[in-house]
């Protein structure tokens, strides 16, 4: 006998969402089927984390925000994230449940690049979306992925044609300023053969209070020879539970560069994975997180090697203070037949408080002999000798600690492809660490 779960959304809400957005029947049917799946699927099993104890019921309801004529109509506090993106014309903004602004410069559009809201793209690019939507992240993986497939709204669709190289970064902002509005964007990127693109996004709250669940999915499909650089910074408030699945599927000779900043103030779960299907495909992942207060964080980075001569490298840095807890998982899986694969990973946790907790869990799962794999992990506090040495050179204790922390996080922060976001990430780190 099947036990059904009481879900935070019902069929009438899903049907209303489909009707309001005017989406094709296949998507409406997919939503209905996914909701039915969610009722019979368990929550994900996370390493050393009881996610069922987290607040997971506040999904809100779909609310369409009014469109903007210009990104300059956004509040000043929000515009600081934009930099030159609005002037360059390569910017998308989602406010709560829907996309409110999308622009693509003429020179990029002339190359056949599509950069728009996923909901809006369904009408013109429906078949391409149908071939890829929820194919990297399966609907039936767990209750959260099924709920996302049923409730997603807004999001991004980015398509780069064969042999096209986009020289400038494309940027998206995901803004939540109404806790009663659903916030479940889906980012879908398809990079065709031998194409190159850099995509950057930022998640944040503005004058928002109350509890909310962000349930987001990122799917990237890198065709043979494609190169995708993906950077994302999450800076959501303490009332937001952030649940994010990111996955890239790489074909022959393709490459993905992940640059992730998990800077939320509430409970956070993320799973960033590269599926190296094609021969010679490459994945490079750099992740940082900072925990404060009573936060609970479960951060997983994975590389699954299927093709021959595949290469993966993962670096994760976590800084924990107060009573926060972080479970940092690094998983390198080398399948049978993935000969001459190479997988390296490093997880390091720096604790600034005796009541903070950080676990680094490196895992190597190897089913092939002719491979190379390794890992390194450490959990510890700031070395007092380092602080003393810097103070002996005339640096204050506070400044010495700040320099040590920045040096610890530098392998990721320095890789942010847009300068204004790099600076913003530094400000977020300072704010979270009270410096």
Image: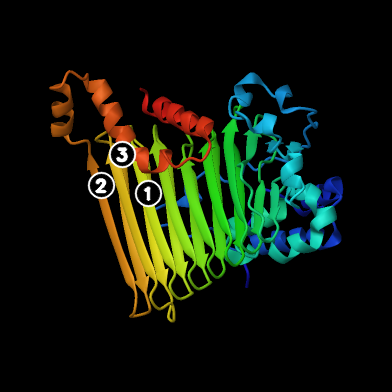
Q: Quadrant of residue 124?
A: bottom right
Element under label 1? strand
**Mark 2–mark 1 distance (CA, rounded to whole Å):** 12 Å
Residue 316, label in figure: 1
Residue 408, label in figure: 3
Viewer-side residue, 166 vs 403: 166
**Mark 3–mark 2 distance (CA, rounded to whole Å):** 12 Å
Q: Is residue 15 left or right of residue 75?
A: right
**Mark 3–mark 1 distance (CA, rounded to whole Å):** 10 Å
Viewer-side residue, 214 vs 110: 110
What x and y, as percent, mark residue 84? 62, 30
Identify the image quadrant of the C terminus. top left
Q: Can residue 207 be seen in this view?
A: no
Q: Is residue 338 left or right of residue 20?
A: left
Q: Can residue 280 be seen in this view?
A: yes
Contact check, label 3 and label 2, Cβ < 8 Å: no
What x and y, as percent, mark residue 128? 76, 62
Q: In this view, does 401 lie to the left or right of 68?
A: left
Label 2: which residue?
379
- Residue drawn at 34 percent across, 35 percent down: 323
- Residue drawn at 57 percent across, 69 percent down: 251
Q: Is residue 241 above or below residue 5?
A: above
Q: Which of marks 3 and 1 is nearer the N terminus?
A: 1
Q: Is residue 251 above or below residue 243?
A: below
């Amino acid at each position: 006998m099947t036990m059904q779960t009481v879900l935070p959304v019902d069929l009438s809400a899903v049907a209303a969402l489909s009707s309001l957005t005017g989406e094709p029947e296949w998507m409406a049917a997919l939503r209905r089927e996914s909701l039915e799946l969610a009722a019979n699927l368990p929550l994900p099993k996370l390493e050393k984390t009881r996610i069922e104890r987290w607040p997971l019921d506040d999904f809100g309801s779909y609310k369409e925000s009014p469109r903007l004529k210009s990104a300059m109509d956004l509040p000043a506090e929000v515009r600081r994230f934009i930099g030159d993106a609005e002037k360059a014309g390569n910017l998308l903004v989602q406010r709560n449940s829907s996309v409110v602004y999308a622009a693509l410069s003429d020179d990029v559009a002339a190359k056949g690049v599509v950069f728009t809201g996923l909901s809006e793209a369904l009408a013109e690019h429906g078949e391409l979306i149908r071939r890829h939507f929820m194919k990297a992240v399966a609907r039936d993986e767990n209750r959260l992925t099924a709920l996302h497939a049923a409730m997603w709204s807004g999001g991004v669709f980015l398509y780069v044609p064969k042999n096209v190289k986009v020289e400038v970064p494309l940027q998206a902002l995901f803004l939540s300023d109404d806790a009663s509005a659903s916030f479940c964007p889906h980012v879908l990127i398809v990079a065709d053969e031998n194409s190159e693109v850099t995509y950057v996004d930022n998640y944040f709250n503005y004058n928002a209070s109350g509890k909310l669940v962000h349930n987001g999915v990122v799917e990237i499909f890198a065709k043979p020879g494609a190169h995708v650089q993906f950077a994302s910074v999450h800076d959501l408030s303490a009332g937001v539970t952030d649940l994010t699945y990111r996955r890239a599927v790489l074909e022959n000779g393709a490459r993905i560069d992940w640059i992730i900043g998990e800077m939320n103030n509430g409970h956070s779960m993320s799973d960033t994975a590269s599926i190296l299907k094609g021969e010679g495909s490459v994945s490079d992942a750099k992740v940082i997180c900072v925990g404060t207060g009573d936060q609970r964080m479960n951060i997983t980075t994975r590389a699954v090697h299927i093709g021959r001569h595949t290469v993966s490298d993962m670096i994760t840095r976590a800084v924990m203070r107060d009573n926060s807890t972080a479970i940092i998982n690094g998983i390198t899986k080398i399948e049978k037949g993935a000969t001459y694969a190479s997988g390296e990973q490093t997880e390091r946790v720096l604790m600034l408080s005796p009541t903070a907790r950080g676990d680094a869990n490196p895992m190597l799962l190897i089913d092939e002999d002719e491979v190379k794999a390794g890992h390194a992990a450490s959990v510890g506090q700031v070395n007092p000798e380092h602080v003393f040495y810097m103070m002996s050179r005339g640096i204050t204790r506070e400044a010495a600690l700040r320099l040590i922390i920045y040096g610890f996080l530098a392998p990721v922060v320095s890789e942010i492809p847009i300068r204004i976001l790099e600076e913003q990430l530094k400000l977020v780190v300072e704010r979270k660490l009270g410096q």
